[in-house]
Amino acid sequence: MADEKKKRFYYTTPVGTLRYPNLEKARQFINKKGKPEGKPKLDCGWFHENPAVMKKVKADLEAGAKGIGWSKGEATPFKKDKKTGQEYLKAQTGEDHRPIIQDAKCNDIPLSKRIGGGSKGRVMITLEYYDGFGGGVTAYLNGVQIAKLEEYKAGGQFDEIEGEEIASDDDDDGDNAGKEGFGELPDAEDMHDF
């Protein structure tokens, strides 16, 4: 449904795959000079493995965008992965407009559950037309509904595997008593390049 006065179109995708969802903490864009640019954003990519579904979503969004003033050749929220060629929808919002995040049964998902890429879900967006910079539409992220969660794991975290457990609470020499992980890091001046 288009809102002519505000130049907006509302849409919810079918269940697909989330790409680099950043829903917990707003990310600040850093330009090539290393300087922050714009306001911090929450964002999420979405794609579907079935080309026919992607084609239908693109057609739906193109029709909605035309209804709010968009013309072919103007910017769209669809991007293409440079390595894989996979086309995806990118939606974002400011940190002051946090999207709803719910599971398949419409229960709110706490921010402590980190949603990772590869999670299956759908996104609810608002397309908004803009005249500047040659014209186009932006996809604002209103909500994400998770059908199958893939929890985010920071680099360096492992899943448990079969094998020997070495770590123990019993520390014979007591050097690491009360410390977790690798202990204290050395001072910067004590560190050397490899």
Image: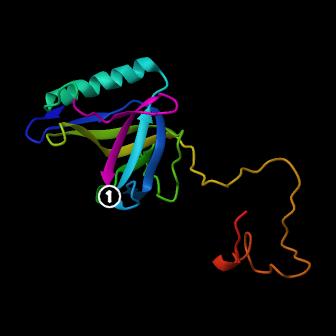
Count of numbered marks: 1
Is 76 placed left or right of 182 in the picture? Answer: left
Crowding at dot 1, Cα within 10 Å, few <14 / some 14-19 / many 20+, comes out as few
**Which residues are drawn in magenta?**
74-94
Q: Secondary structure at mark 1?
A: strand
- Spot occupied by residue 36 in the image (x, y as percentages of width and height): 35, 61
Q: Amino acid at mark 1?
A: Glu
- Pick out the residue farthest to the top: 52
- Pick out the residue farthest to the left: 5
The C terminus: image quadrant:
bottom right
Is 149 placed left or right of 181 in the picture? Answer: left
| Residue appearing at x 28%, y 24% in the figure | 60
Quadrant of the rendered image containing residue 165: bottom right
Instruction: Depth check: give the residue in front, 89 or 32.
Output: 32
- Spot occupied by residue 20 in the image (x, y as percentages of width and height): 48, 44
- Label 1 belongs to which residue? 37
| Residue appearing at x 52%, y 33% in the figure | 83
Q: Is residue 187 visible?
A: no
Q: Magenta segment: does it hold 86?
A: yes
- Spot occupied by residue 177 in the image (x, y as percentages of width and height): 80, 81
Q: Is residue 130 visible?
A: yes
The N terminus: image quadrant:
top left
| Residue appearing at x 89%, y 54% in the figure | 164
- Spot occupied by residue 50 in the image (x, y as percentages of width and height): 47, 21
Q: How is the image coloured?
A: rainbow
Instruction: Depth check: give the residue in front, 22 or 106.
Output: 22
Quadrant of the rendered image containing residue 7: top left
Q: Magenta segment: does it hold 26?
A: no
